[in-house]
Image (tube, rainbow, N blue to C red):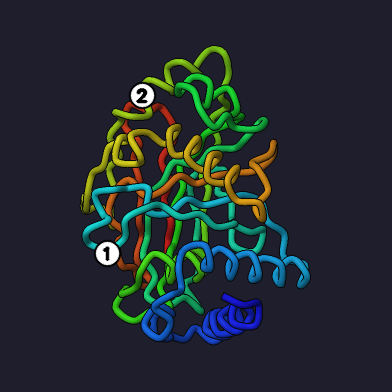
Amino acid sequence: MNDATIEAIADALLAAHAGAASLAPITDSMPDFDVAAAYRVLHEIERRRVAQDWRPVGRKIGFTNRTLWPRYGVDRPMWAHVWRETVSHAADGQATLSLAGMVLPRIEPEVVFGLRGPVPVSGDAQRVMDAVDWIAPGFEIVQSHFPQWRFKVPDCTAAFGLHAALVVGPRTPVNEANRSTLAALLPRFELTLRSGERSVESGIGANVLDSPAAALAFLARVLEDDPDAAPLEAGELVTTGTLTDAWPVTAGQSWSSDYGDLGISGLRVTLA
């Protein structure tokens, strides 16, 4: 796919984002638009954002929850940058987030890691956690510029990885005292998602590529194979994918998460 076509697709997606608009899936009119081309579009969008003084602060991994693949018609995870402009921090576990300008937003409870160094592309959870400086609860708000959340993997990859916003909750330092415990708990802890005081859904850590730590290693491997993508570095944050389904949200709702015996604080977000 030539550069002009890649740039035209980036133009269309950025215009849809700026106008909170919908557009037909790219693959509807371009059946040969594949995942490799989608990442070229994503990198073009990222290049333009950096030129406009946006600052990348980490990555998101999407569709790590394989239980959702049949529902959304996908067959693999994807990744995209998260930005200073899209990430907010709730050190006290409480946040208010505006949905203005978002299209068909949905909420995802996730595990967020802050990195102390490069992530190994192979090895067990303990080795992966050696690269982690802190762990936190997170709510990612995802959106679809494609009507009815209908798309193929290349479409949603190119479309900002579906990322709209990320709220990161209280950070728990990862150190020698808790690293092994966290590595063991990450596959099996149970998260509870609530809307108001109503329990909506529960999910376990193993939903996310068998463990959020395994999702982090997966991302490191994917980036190693992409010559246009920088490897993970110290100081970045990575949100590892939803432990439950992605639930539609509207202004006025309050959502909260409980991470059970993982031992990290939950997070409450009020949507405006």
SS of the residue under disc 2: helix
Q: Nearer the viewer, residue 257 or 214?
A: 214
Instruction: Give the x, y percent position of residue 167.
Output: 51, 53
> Residue at label 1?
73
Q: Nearer the viewer, residue 240 or 223?
A: 223
> Residue at label 2?
185
Instruction: Give the x, y percent position of residue 157.
Output: 47, 64
Which label was assigned to residue 114? none
Residue 2 falls in which quadrant of the image? Answer: bottom right
Counting every numbered tag in the picture gives: 2
Measure the C-alpha gap from mark 2 to mark 1: 30 Å
Q: Amino acid at mark 1?
A: Gly
Disc number lying in front (2 or 1): 1
Q: Nearer the viewer, residue 116 or 138?
A: 116
Instruction: Give the x, y percent position of residue 265.
Output: 44, 36
Residue 78, compared with residue 105, is above or below; it is above
Residue at 53% in and 68% down? 37
Residue at 65% in and 52% down? 229
Left or right, residue 132 beside residue 209: right
Give the mark, 2 or 1, whose residue is nearer the N terminus.
Answer: 1
Instruction: Give the x, y percent position of residue 177.
Output: 53, 12
Residue at 43% in and 22% down? 183
